[in-house]
Image: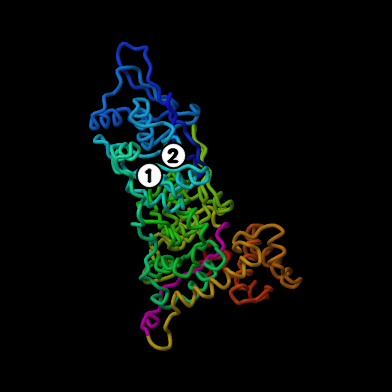
Amino acid sequence: MISLNSIIFNGMDATKIDVQVQISSGLAKPDFFIIGLADRAVKESAERVTNAMNALNVTRPSRRLTVNLSPADVEKSGSHFDLPILCGILCALGILLEDKLSKYLIMGEIGLDGSILKTDGVLPASVWAKNHNMGIICPASQGAEAKLSGITNILAPTHVLDLINHFQGVCEIEFPKDNIQTDNTTDTNIDMNEVYGQQAAKRALEIAAAGGHAMLMVGPPGSGKTMLASRLPTIMPDMTTEEILETSVIYSIAGKLNGTGLITKRPFRAVHHTASPVSLAGGGSDARPGEISLAHNGVLFLDELPEFNRATLEILRQPMESGKIMISRARHNATYPANFQLIAAMNPCPCGHLGNAALSCTRAPRCAEAYQNKISGPLLDRIDLHVDVDAVNPWDMKPDTTNIPESSAIIRARVVAARNRQLQRQGYVNAMLNGNALDNFAKLTPEMTEFLNTAAERVGLSARGYNRIKRIARTIADLAGRDDIIMDDLIEALSYRPINRGKYGVKL
């Protein structure tokens, strides 16, 4: 029996799979069996491998051929088992040596002509192999991706024949070259200085970036909500090395790394309102990460928030609190990180012109109340900053020397300074402050506590909303470079909570 190594991923957790190949007698007619709780894609490997052997002029043994994927009680999926299965058969036929191949983690899809094709998860697989003192054999198109993990023992052939020639000493496979570029997930041509007016919204966006807070913008069409949201990544701090690798691993598992290199820019995932619950949370037959996880360490932007299916939106509640998402299926329980920053935007009513007598429909304000009630209270309670984005005054849109907006670089400098204060003080952003840490790092004077308690009682704030005001006040103080929160910080923080929609007269 031949035993080689491959891998599967259950969320971010990896499980080594022993690909066991045995050629035995027992049938008058030769047959090819793949066992070990394999899905359809894995079982179809028998046809791909058989045709690849024909292309190599290797005769399949005229006996029973059994491939067992161990452990047998773990479901296997994906086409990356093609290469280890074929390598196992070649070892059984004496063409390759098991003792040499057993030192590698092997993955890759096989074409009918014996070419080795791209597969998902090469980056996390190479990280696992490096941590377990193994090499990796992967498709040539992903050799540079494997190299990103820091692993030095990489074989990245384009064809099975290249692998055979390498191990037989005919022609060695070259070490992968650095032929991939840094991925840019955000548009570097946009800047906050292109946004005229909207001082209150830009202030709230700065607070959101500094403290990692969720934010909801409400305003008429064309007021600049999407424009503001798309520029949030331009004022956010750079990703740390740990964040870069973790985010890149998620994209590799999802098959979205595409040979472009590590994800070094904070992700900005703008999800359409027709998105299904599975596309947002993740799932499917192989429990792939969804948009929530693809936005990890970055921004998840939901435009036209009330137009989303309510069941889809409710998925956000748990990961917004815990920073991770668990996908539970009949045969899968996968957990992915989901530490994203939610930025949402919506019109105040279906027509979008509530409060404008010239443009609003005849059903106002009743239609606005029904429209805004599509979003559940528990979800709204988890959003820190609620901001009205009014239509821009035409006079503010004309650039002159008196109203030149600040650039992203200037705002970003303040945000980075505030973030550094938070990391030095508690090791994480203010949006994650809870329990004793919140009490210790967001202390209020007796006067401020009395003021906040009175306000909370009058407007009916929940305990969650109460704590969120303290977190926002802490971020405002950090932006100002203050060690202690002052009354002005608390008052400004309270203004961002959804007490009443003011001029619209509709609670949200």
**Span of residues in magenta:** 381-399
Asked if disc 2 and disc 1 are in contact, CB closer than 8 Å, the reply is yes
| Residue identifier under label 1 | 155
Quarter of the image for the N terminus: give it.
Answer: top left
Residue 84 sits in which quadrant?
top left
In three-dimensional space, the C-alpha distance between marks 2 and 1, rounded to whole angstroms, equals 9 Å
- In the rendered image, the residue lying farthest to the right is 446
Say if residue 494 shows up in the picture.
no
**Residue annotated with mark 2:** 104
Q: Position of residue 49 (x, y in %)?
A: 30, 30
300 w.r.t. 47: above or below: below
**Residue 495 position by quadrant:** bottom right
Circle 1 Cα neighbour tier, 10 Å, few/some/many (<14 / 14–19 / ≥20):
many
Numbered disc 1: secondary structure: strand
Crowding near the residue tagged with mark 2, few <14, some 14–19, many ≥20 C-alpha atoms within 10 Å: many
Q: Is residue 57 a member of the stretch shown in magenta? A: no
**Count of marks overlaid on the render:** 2
Residue 12 drawn at (x, y percent)? 50, 45
